[in-house]
Image: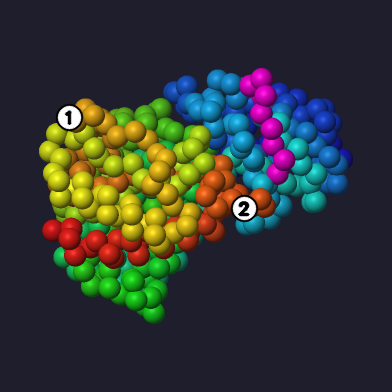
Amino acid sequence: MPITVSAAFDSGNIEVLRADGPQAIDLAIRKDAHSDFYQWFYFRLSGARGEACRVRITNCAGSAYPGGWPDYRAVVSTDRQTWTRTETSYADGILTIDVTPAADSIWIAYFAPYTMERHHDLIARIAAAPGVTTRVLGTTLDGQDLDCIDIAGGPLQVWLYARQHPGETMAEYWMEGAFDRLIDAADPVATALRAKASFHIIPNMNPDGSRRGHLRTNAVGANLNREWAGPTLDRSPEVVHALAAMDATGADFTMDVHGDESLPHNFIAGFEGIPKITDRQLGLLGDYKAILARLSPDFQTRIGYPPSAPGRANLTMSTNQLANRFGCLAMTLEMPFKDAAENPDPVAGWSPERCRALGRDCLAALLEVVDRLR
């Protein structure tokens, strides 16, 4: 049976240079459309059951974040439900993945994929819960729906949104955990939060990039998290529609959920440096991070991005724009593609299950500051 490699499916990304045998599989990651960004890969390897395979991805030196490759391990699955890490090494710009497939086909990815089909399953499942409504904020350049889930509750306005960068699939797994907690009628955290706040949740800000297998951009190569100061319908309609919906409700708390290629940690980036910053906002941000570190052993506050200097925040980024625009508590949550150094798992690494758990813990932390948001 010949060995084949393919990626012509939802969220797939790879180019085949050669597949001449189990030890002669050379591949390259395809760039995002109209962009030089690339790092996300997701492909199927078939015809090598029980054979020790060596897969080389040869163009990693020019990827968006080459610092993300050292100490990284790829994920593999034979059922596309359970993903585990496999032996991976990086040298001289080449990522080498060693795997012995236990089935006729195995799927290999940068992180556990979150396809648009899974996204639609999520929307359908959560929409069936009491007190939940769904709406389409608008359409993308590829004609896909930009979904928003609203959970009716108290007067505070909470906005959660994820996958501005589509290859950061851990962000939508985080959403699953947050949703499951919020719709659980027996969960006291959810009951208390919903009494105080209404939730507006965009689980995938970039459907086009997700389906196309992009790392960071939408259909025309726009990095959505650099579009919030002046989005346009011909370049970043996703941000136009999301920002209009936020303006309509206002915002007391916002969280933008992401993944970081290089840092093996979970951390939060804030809005230091915005022109209209207040001591109240800074105090709430520090308190939220400290609470989350107490609640979750997977979260830490020692390592993260350096804060912007006073008055130098980039207002094209959503967290800075929203904190400045609404005077709210806003933040960006970053999760690792690598394993989390604080609590390593040699089998699964940082995983969808742990993303979901962190989503639940982030809501518990929100409950401890929610009475101070106004």
Is 191 situated above or below 22? below
Residue 347, given in percent of the width and then of the height, sits at: 67, 52
Tag 2–tag 1 contact (CB < 8 Å): no
Q: How is the image coloured?
A: rainbow
Image mark for residue 263: none
| Residue 20 in picture, x, y percent from top left | 82, 28
Residue found at x 53% / y 28%: 67
- Lateral position of residue 227 relative to residue 108, left or right: left
Report if residue 371 is visible in the image.
Answer: yes
Which residues make up the magenta segment?
86-94
Amino acid type for the residue under numbered disc 2: Asp
User: Image check: 61 left or right of 174?
Assistant: right
- Read off the residue under disc 2: 345
Q: Which residue is mark 1?
A: 311
97 or 202, which lies in front? 97
Indicate yes or no whether the magenta region holds residue 259: no
